[in-house]
Amino acid sequence: MSAQQTPKLVRLDFGPLPVDLINRTTGLELETGHVFFSINAQKHAARRHPLVYSKALPHVAAVIADPMYLGDDFHNHGKIELVARIAALGNALLVAVEVTRDDKGRYNVTSFYPISQKKIDNRREKGRLLIVKKR
């Protein structure tokens, strides 16, 4: 592959959405389903967050599987935010996921980006982020 070519993007499967944790913590009633990251959403996230995209992408599945915080994205209706600290990034990572499944029963990531502890604390104080209820 030459230096000017970019790798071909493919839809990514991040595994099952932890609906039990989400439902217990938020009161939502989500059904089981896998979380996918479409090619268009990948392009969007790469354009919006070009400096951190490639560093953060390998950690998205871990945040989805085991979030520390969950919240309703009031600015983007129909999405939930999953947040976890990622030591390799030196920050937490927020992953935005649509709460409505597509026609194939899949949930879709719309974006992800690092989030500071200050922003986490601010969102927790406002009730926008909740500590995940593990049991």
Image (cartoon, rainbow, N blue to C red):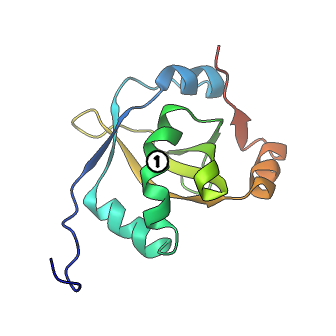
The 10 Å Cα crowd at callout 1, few under 14, some 14 to 19, many 20 or more, is many
Q: State the residue at coordinates (60%, 57%).
A: 89
Which residue is at the far left?
Answer: 1
Q: Which residue is mark 1?
A: 60
The quadrant in which the C terminus is found is top right
Q: Secondary structure at mark 1?
A: helix
Q: State the residue at coordinates (50%, 71%).
A: 49
Question: Mark 1: which amino acid?
Answer: Val
Quadrant assignment, res 99? top left
The quadrant in which the N terminus is found is bottom left
In the displayed structure, 65 sits above or below 110; it is above
Quadrant assignment, res 118? bottom right
Q: State the residue at coordinates (45%, 26%).
A: 30
Instruction: Indicate the position of residue 4 as horizontal and vertical percent values.
Output: 22, 86
Q: State the residue at coordinates (41%, 49%).
A: 109
Q: Answer left or right for 119 relative to 67.
A: right
Instruction: Indicate the position of residue 71 as horizontal and vertical percent values.
Output: 64, 41
Which residue is at the far bottom?
Answer: 4
Q: Answer left or right for 21 relative to 100.
A: right
Question: From this viewpoint, is residue 115 visible?
Answer: yes
Q: Answer left or right for 122 relative to 61.
A: right
Instruction: Indicate the position of residue 95 as horizontal and vertical percent values.
Output: 52, 49
Question: From this viewpoint, is residue 74 visible?
Answer: no
Instruction: Indicate the position of residue 40 as horizontal and vertical percent values.
Output: 29, 63
Residue 133 versus residue 125: which sits nearer the camera?
A: 133
